[in-house]
Amino acid sequence: MKATSGADPDSLVISARDLRKTYHTTPAVVALRGVDIDVAAGERVVISGRSGAGKSTLLNILGLLDTATSGSYMLLGHDTAATDKSGRDRLRAQALGFVFQENHILGHRTAAENVDLTLSISRVPRGERADLIDQALARVGLVHRRDALARLLSGGEKQRLAVARAMVNHPRVLLADEPTGNLDDDNAQQVLELFDTHAATGVAVVVISHDIRLSAWADRALCLVDGTLVENVAAPGGAA
């Protein structure tokens, strides 16, 4: 079964066909063997699969951090294969937000400075940043921690800060890699509720996870099996 959406094609923010990825190592490693995926605006999609199934490879391609060996990938109507590196960099900065399991928060900087990194990369004028930072921190309940060093935040606070940093620029797509993997139930629920809030505004949320809590949360649960995506199938032998 193909992991394509029944949504109106005009609502799709991600539409990929026959994505294939081979790493030309010795021996060669085939990570993706023909992935089809559609994601509509406001949709919440979770992708599971065994370790080595190609989840991170797929996320990197969707996030324009890597390119497929072959296949087509349309992001917000842009043909990414026909876009040069500088164009992909601009599209990634403007359209995509990222949240990772390890959060990649800079502990020696304040919460506000961590959020400001996204705005700096996106070249938002400095005079506009303070309000955007405060709004982003308020949305995740951390405005009172604005000037705290990030290393002093709790694990849950760091992950919420990662969401604020990802969403401060109002991207159209949020890509998350194991965002609840290191969190207890309460903190995981807080992160999912933040994702819900953004999805309700039309942000597409794509999550790579082995966390079984997310299958019930998502609008669609997909699984990578032998380099292809299938729908509503549990990862054989347990997700990883």
Image (tube, grey):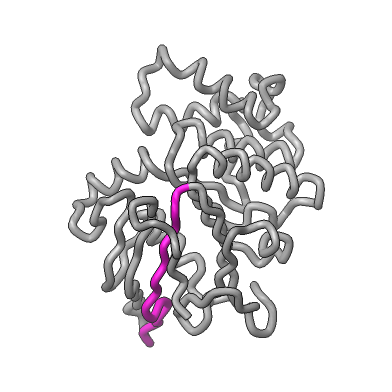
What type of secondary structure mainly makes up the magenta span? strand
Residue at 71% from the left image edge and 20% from the top image edge: 144
Of the pair 187 and 44, the residue shown nearer to us: 44
Q: Does 183 appear above or below 20? A: above
66 relative to 146 in the view: left or right: left
In percent of width and height, residue 98 lies at: 50, 47
In percent of width and height, residue 167 lies at: 51, 36
Picture quarter with the C terminus: bottom right
Residue 123: quadrant of the picture: top left
Residue at 69% from the left image edge and 27% from the top image edge: 142
In percent of width and height, residue 117 lies at: 47, 31
Residue at 50% from the left image edge and 47% from the top image edge: 42
* Residue numbers of the magenta segment: 27-41
In percent of width and height, residue 51 lies at: 59, 75
84 relative to 129 in the view: left or right: left
Of the pair 5 and 85, the residue shown nearer to us: 5
147 relative to 62 in the view: left or right: right
Q: Does 203 appear above or below 139? A: below
